[in-house]
Image (tube, grey):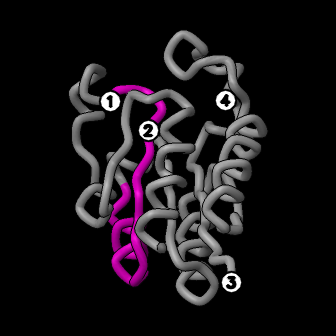
């Protein structure tokens, strides 16, 4: 029986491929979704893939995942550094959580070095480009067996 994982994306990731391609690359969010779906199929996982520019919508998706998902892969984007509310929501989720960042955040501005989400995450992928999503889905497959 396949298991469902939620892959959640925060603000401005809808502009992936257009916004600062020198940092985030040229792949679009649709490319990332296809990459995740292909990797999930290898591990007999189903995905729910979502993006929102609104913190409350991301929190609602985490709450929904509590009832429907075995794991969460999340790129909270700028909310990584600011959102205690997303951390609190993730703390209500009982399955594994993997945090993803396309860029190597520790080589960037100092404010990007702190992550509230990392306080809950079971693993963090940073600096792998969009391939970090594929690696996170593969690890989720391993964790969920």
Proximity of marks 1 and 2: CB atoms separated by less than 8 Å: yes
Closer-to-camera residue (86/27) = 27
Judge the density around disc 1: few (<14), some (14-19), many (≥20) Cα neighbours within 10 Å.
Answer: some
Q: CA distance from mark 3 to mark 4?
A: 33 Å
Callout 4: SS: loop
Callout 1: SS: helix
Residue 103, image x, y percentages: 42, 27
- Label 2 or label 3, whichever comes before in sequence order: 3
Q: Is residue 87 left or right of residue 61?
A: left
Judge the density around disc 3: few (<14), some (14-19), many (≥20) Cα neighbours within 10 Å.
Answer: few
Proximity of marks 3 and 4: CB atoms separated by less than 8 Å: no
Residue 81, image x, y percentages: 33, 46
Say the numbered circle drawn on residue 101: 2
Is 101 above or below relative to 24? below
Q: Which residue is mark 1?
A: 105
Q: Which residue is mark 4?
A: 16
Q: Residue at x 53, y 85 (%)?
A: 66
Q: How many numbered discs?
A: 4
Is 49 above or below relative to 88? above
Q: Residue at x 38, y 42 (%)?
A: 125
Judge the density around disc 4: few (<14), some (14-19), many (≥20) Cα neighbours within 10 Å.
Answer: some
Closer-to-camera residue (88/128) = 128
Is 29 above or below relative to 45? above
Q: Which residues are magenta?
A: 83-104
Q: CA distance from mark 2 to mark 4?
A: 12 Å
Q: Which residue is mark 3?
A: 1
Q: CA distance from mark 4 to mark 1?
A: 16 Å
Is 11 above or below relative to 142? above
- Label 1 or label 3, whichever comes before in sequence order: 3
Residue 109, image x, y percentages: 28, 23
Callout 2: SS: strand
Callout 3: SS: loop
């Amino acid at each position: 029986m396949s298991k469902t994982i939620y892959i959640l994306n925060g603000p401005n990731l809808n502009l992936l491929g257009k916004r600062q391609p020198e940092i985030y690359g040229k792949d679009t969010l649709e490319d990332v979704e296809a990459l995740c779906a292909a990797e999930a199929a290898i591990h007999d996982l189903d995905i729910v893939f979502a993006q929102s520019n609104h913190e409350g919508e991301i929190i609602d998706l985490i709450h929904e995942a509590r009832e429907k998902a075995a794991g969460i892969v999340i790129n909270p984007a700028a909310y990584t550094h600011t959102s205690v509310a997303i951390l609190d929501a993730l703390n209500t989720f009982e399955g594994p959580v993997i945090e993803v960042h396309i860029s190597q955040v520790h080589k960037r501005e100092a404010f990007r070095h702190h992550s509230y989400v990392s306080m809950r995450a079971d693993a963090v992928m940073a600096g792998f480009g969009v391939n970090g999503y594929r690696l996170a889905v593969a690890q989720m497959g391993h964790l969920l067996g």
